[in-house]
Image: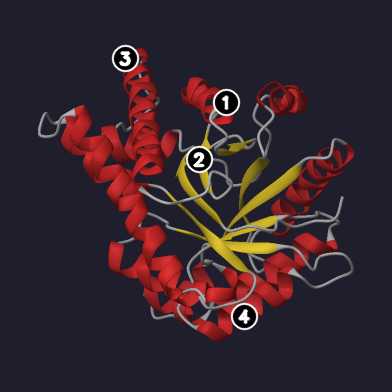
Amino acid sequence: MSPGHDTPLYFLAFDHRGVFARSVLGAEGPPTPEQDQTIADAKQLIFEGVLRAAELGAIPPAQLGVLVDERYGAPVARAAGAAGIVLTMPVEEPDREIFDFSYGERFGEHVEEFSPDFAKVLVRWNVDGDVAGNSIQAVRLRALSDWLRAHDRRLLFELIVAPTAAQLEAAGGERLRFELEQRPALIRRAMAAVQRAGIEVDVWKLEGLDDVADAEAVVEQARSGKGREGVVCTVLGAGASRGRVEHWLRVAAGVDGFAGFAIGRSIWRDPLRAHLAGDLSREQVARQIAERYLRFVDVYVSAAPLAVR
């Protein structure tokens, strides 16, 4: 099975676990059992927004996707699969600086139980950062990649490049300056390191790029090496403002090799907070999530060349 994917993908991402509790509930420690139930219900509500979007928008099922976890979203995952929605599920343990598997050596059993279209990993990898940690990650991710290939399954790789202290200092302590001046090259270098480790990625989920030349460069890296001609990249939202996310989408949409997005908090965080505060009904939240999601789809599709829509 050659790496890659051949259709646009528009994922509504809500596989967040610890981040979800902090972002929506304001939880400072591990969620309580009551908060666990609230999170599970919130994920069901997000999925209701996905279904509303499917009704409102002319998005083929093969392009409409959800990224949801097993811990809080198992019923959603099963419903999405039954509805023909593209399903992606994480296999990483959340809130770890060094990648490790959820469910340990039994990760494969969980993949096979839900049979998602993609297994997803979130990986923090700065090539100038924790060298020993990157080496540990490389071994674990190679084991995952080999298992997925052996079982004819595909990998979506979410790459996060946080600045080292030296990199942030070089950017005058300004995170935005780091993102504009240093991060694009660090993304490419991290992708190359992953590839050298023998890890085969089908879809790269990457932090937003502000310049077309940088977007073209990451696609070139994604497709470097024999057999990777079909590998594609998508844009992650990182909880950024709507304006900044829309800029990233317009940049990526015009570049051959980008194939959509995987956006989460920028879509559902504010409506869910309003719902939990008693300011929005369930119906209103589902509608707002659908409208926000479809807005991002429209931005991307409108900026994409006709040949790749």
- Dots 4, 1 in contact, CB < 8 A: no
Tag 3, which secondary structure?
helix
Classify mark 1: residues with Cα within 10 Å, few (<14), some (14-19) or many (20+): few
Q: Amino acid at mark 2?
A: Val
Q: CA distance from mark 4 to mark 2?
A: 26 Å
Q: CA distance from mark 2 to mark 1?
A: 13 Å
Tag 2, which secondary structure?
strand
Which residue appears at 62% of the width and 80% of the height?
Answer: 216
Of the two numbered discs 1 and 3 on the same chain, state the one appearing first in sequence. Answer: 3
Q: Amino acid at mark 3?
A: Glu
In this view, the mark in front (4 or 1): 1
Of the two numbered discs 4 and 3 on the same chain, state the one appearing first in sequence. Answer: 3
Of the two numbered discs 4 and 1 on the same chain, state the one appearing first in sequence. Answer: 1
Viewer-proximal residue among 174 and 242 = 242
Q: Is residue 189 above or below residue 281?
A: below
In this view, the mark in front (3 or 2): 2
Residue 61 position, x and y percent, is 54, 43
Of the two numbered discs 2 and 1 on the same chain, state the one appearing first in sequence. Answer: 2
Q: Residue 205: which disc?
A: none
Residue, disc 1? 82
Viewer-proximal residue among 211 and 152 = 152
Q: Residue 66: which disc?
A: 2
Viewer-proximal residue among 265 and 31 = 265
Q: Is residue 215 above or below residue 231?
A: below
